[in-house]
């Protein structure tokens, strides 16, 4: 995660935002524009925009792109991901075709891909690559259980709780040690504790998975069932003290700094100085940040109360589960059977896609370097830099004009906005994989384990050093974007700069409604319910007056309630509190991108309410391409899983619920009271 100071004084941003003398409008007629990212033929004229805007824009696309058995959901992001996979596949196969020399990047990438594709060898090996480690767990004597715990944490999994280094919440220029909850195979506590029939079904599917995988590992059915029961006993106990999804969004509540003496007093069943040395090779930890105090306490208590047999069974499952993706087809088939219940997918991803994912997980930046050389022109980066500054100016205007925020807090918000670091396309410094060892004589699992340990050593080597602000959290070929509050940065990998997000041939309306909204979305994350806790330097500092914080909380509660009212499936409503940050960013992105778009068109002399782009006004096209981004087909199982476990709202809600708060949208499509998309002004929630 990176941070590079921009040469942009705060006064420049404020001046632009306050609207100094406007640039003279062009007297020449603007050239005719056409839609390229959005196909007018996909609009469904049988559906009124004021009835269901999402379906109006995307219904025909949904019908033309039915779900295949491989997918539990398929949308515009997936179309781009599929296209990128083919590009990356061509790159990887091209490396193999050069007959690369051992030790080169090309050789390492090719070997990982080829081993992942070699089902014959992997099926012949079966569970052999993990037998020695399973035997080590089984043969461990009581007096050596502590060393077994260190070995598991340091090499294979994180039983009972998690620990590791990350930027310090309180001083983002340095790293801190964190101790957190963890240890749950299903991630979310409700899967273990809820009596809802769907949660029970998923819980039963996990039990079946554990039995299947332990039998694949060589255990008989009776022993596999015993292991399953002990795993469920332990994970259910941990789940009882695990935070709810809503609680997990409270970042200030996670900032619990404890000295080593305090940590040892709180959790006496773990020798903490020894733990950090044995698992991470770090012997200089003066303090830690404990993110979930009660969850770690439950882990501490369990480690003292469980029998060796129960703990070993838990370790056996944790080990086999982390290894399963790199073993024989029997293991991947069992995982797929679980996915069918969890997500509703009906067919495994093709082997080449899984192999490609392994290669990218291993050496993603090496592949990314080749990707940008071939697919990312300098002009795209230049366009994005200009667009980002337009959005920055627009967000500054919004902040200045907020009616609910005091001038004192506005100045702090503008300072943070001016300090945003912007990363576009690819990192300035590429990762060096010279010391990564890939040996085709080893099993695929052993090579993948060695790759994982290489990445772990690289990460832990940062301890005691200043935070490297030049690092990226995504590879260039990733179709996504992110905001990092600890670096106060917005990052846009090369791969997202494609239609329908961005196309140099598209109209301004499409590009502002696409990548413009994405930029505004990531910027607004700096001011959502989590991002607002960090200052311009990425430190957790409260820069709000109490009155402004209270006003913000009231607005966000109103927005959360709007999403809470949406029934996703019978008996299951959306979770407005859990998805709050993304919902704030969606609304902010739309509003800020619109302001930037209107400013840009005003300078060109374009009237966005009367001029036409293929029969639609530019204002209409702006909103239509936003909806176009979220078009998708999705199975009910995936809808349920995402509603329970994803901080993003479902695509339809990201469109319809969000737009119902935005007055220019109503005007663009003449939506009036009585239509389902209309929301009375008194009920609208506008935050940024």
Image: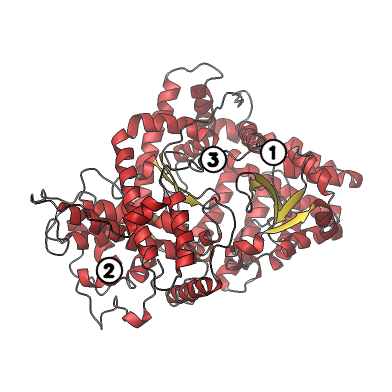
Residue annotated with mark 2: 53
Q: In the visual, does 463 lie left or right of 12? A: right
Q: Nearer the viewer, residue 201 or 280?
A: 280
Report the Cα–Cα distance between label 3 and label 1.
15 Å
- The numbered mark at residue 607 is none
- The numbered mark at residue 469 is 3
Dot 2 or dot 3: first in sequence order is: 2
Residue annotated with mark 1: 464
The residue at the point 52 percent across, 61 percent down is 532
Which element type, helix, strand or loop, lies under badge 3? loop
How far from the left and from the top, in percent, is residue 171?
A: 63, 49
Which element type, helix, strand or loop, lies under badge 2? helix
How far from the left and from the top, in percent, is residue 497?
A: 33, 44
Instruction: Nearest to the eye among marks 2 and 3: give it.
Output: 3
Dot 2 or dot 1: first in sequence order is: 2
Q: In the visual, does 278 lie left or right of 58? A: right
Query: Among all residues in the image, which is located at the extreme right?
Result: 143
Instruction: Nearest to the eye among marks 2 and 1: give it.
Output: 1
Circle 1: is it few (<14), some (14-19), or many (20+) Cα within 10 Å? few
Q: Nearer the viewer, residue 359 or 370?
A: 370
Circle 2: is it few (<14), some (14-19), or many (20+) Cα within 10 Å? many
């Amino acid at each position: 995660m990176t941070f590079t100071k921009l040469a942009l004084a705060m006064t420049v941003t404020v001046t632009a935002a306050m609207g100094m003398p406007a640039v003279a409008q062009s007297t020449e007629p603007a050239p005719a524009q056409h839609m390229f990212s959005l196909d007018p033929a996909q609009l469904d004229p049988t559906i009124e925009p004021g009835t269901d805007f999402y379906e109006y824009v995307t219904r025909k696309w949904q019908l033309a792109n039915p779900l295949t058995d491989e997918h539990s959901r398929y949308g515009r992001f997936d179309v781009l991901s599929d296209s990128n996979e083919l590009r990356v596949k061509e790159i990887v196969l091209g490396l193999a075709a050069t007959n690369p020399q051992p030790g080169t990047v090309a050789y390492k990438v090719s070997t990982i891909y080829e081993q992942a594709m070699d089902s014959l060898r992997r099926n012949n090996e079966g569970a052999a690559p993990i037998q020695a480690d399973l035997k080590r767990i089984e043969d461990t004597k009581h007096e050596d259980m502590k060393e077994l715990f260190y070995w598991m944490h340091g090499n294979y999994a994180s039983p009972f709780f998690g620990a590791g280094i990350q930027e310090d919440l309180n001083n983002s220029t340095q790293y801190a040690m964190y101790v957190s909850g963890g240890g749950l195979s299903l991630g979310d506590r409700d899967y273990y504790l809820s009596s809802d029939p769907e949660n029970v079904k998923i819980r039963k599917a996990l039990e079946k998975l554990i039995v299947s995988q332990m039998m694949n590992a060589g255990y008989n059915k009776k022993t596999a069932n015993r292991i399953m029961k002990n795993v469920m006993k332990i994970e259910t106990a941990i789940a009882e003290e695990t935070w709810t999804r809503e609680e997990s969004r409270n970042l200030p509540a996670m900032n619990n700094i404890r000295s080593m003496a305090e940590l040892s007093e709180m959790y006496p069943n773990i020798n903490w100085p020894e733990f950090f040395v044995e698992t991470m090779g770090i012997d200089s930890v003066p303090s830690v940040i404990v993110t979930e105090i009660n969850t770690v306490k439950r882990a501490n208590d369990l480690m003292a109360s469980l029998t060796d047999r129960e703990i070993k069974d838990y370790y056996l499952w944790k080990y086999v589960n982390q290894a399963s993706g790199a073993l024989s087809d029997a293991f991947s088939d069992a995982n797929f059977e679980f996915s069918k219940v969890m997500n509703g997918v009906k067919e495994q991803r093709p082997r080449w896609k899984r192999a490609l994912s392994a290669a990218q997980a291993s050496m993603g930046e090496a592949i990314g370097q080749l990707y940008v050389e071939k697919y990312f022109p300098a002009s795209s980066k230049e366009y994005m830099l200009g667009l980002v500054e337009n959005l920055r100016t627009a967000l500054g205007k919004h902040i200045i004009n907020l009616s609910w925020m005091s001038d004192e807090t506005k100045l702090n918000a503008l300072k943070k906005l001016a300090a945003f670091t912007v990363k576009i396309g690819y990192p300035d410094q590429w990762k060096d994989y010279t010391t990564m060892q890939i040996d085709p004589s080893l099993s695929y699992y052993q090579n993948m384990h060695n790759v994982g340990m290489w990445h772990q050593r690289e990460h832990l080597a940062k301890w005691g050093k200043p935070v490297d602000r030049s690092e990226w959290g995504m590879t260039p070929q990733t179709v996504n974007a992110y905001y990092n509050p600890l670096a106060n940065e917005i990052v846009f990998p090369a791969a997202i700069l494609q239609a329908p997000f961005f196309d140099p041939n598209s109209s301004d309306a499409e590009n502002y409604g696409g990548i413009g909204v994405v930029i505004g979305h990531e910027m607004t994350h700096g001011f959502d319910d989590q991002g607002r806790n960090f200052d311009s330097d990425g430190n957790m500092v409260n820069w709000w007056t109490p009155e402004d914080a209270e006003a913000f909380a009231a607005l966000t509660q109103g927005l959360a309630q709007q999403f809470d009212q949406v029934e996703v499936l019978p008996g299951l409503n959306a979770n407005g509190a859990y998805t709050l940050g993304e919902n704030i960013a969606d609304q902010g992105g739309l509003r800020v991108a619109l302001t930037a778009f209107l400013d840009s068109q005003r300078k060109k002399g374009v009237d966005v309410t009367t001029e036409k782009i293929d029969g639609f006004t530019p204002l209409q096209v702006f909103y239509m391409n936003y909806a176009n981004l979220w078009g998708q087909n999705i199975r009910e199982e995936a809808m349920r899983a995402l509603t329970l476990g994803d901080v993003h709202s479902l695509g339809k809600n990201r469109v319809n619920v969000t737009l119902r708060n935005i007055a220019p949208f109503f005007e663009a499509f003449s939506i009036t009271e009585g239509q389902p998309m209309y929301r009375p002004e008194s009920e609208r929630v506008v935050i940024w």
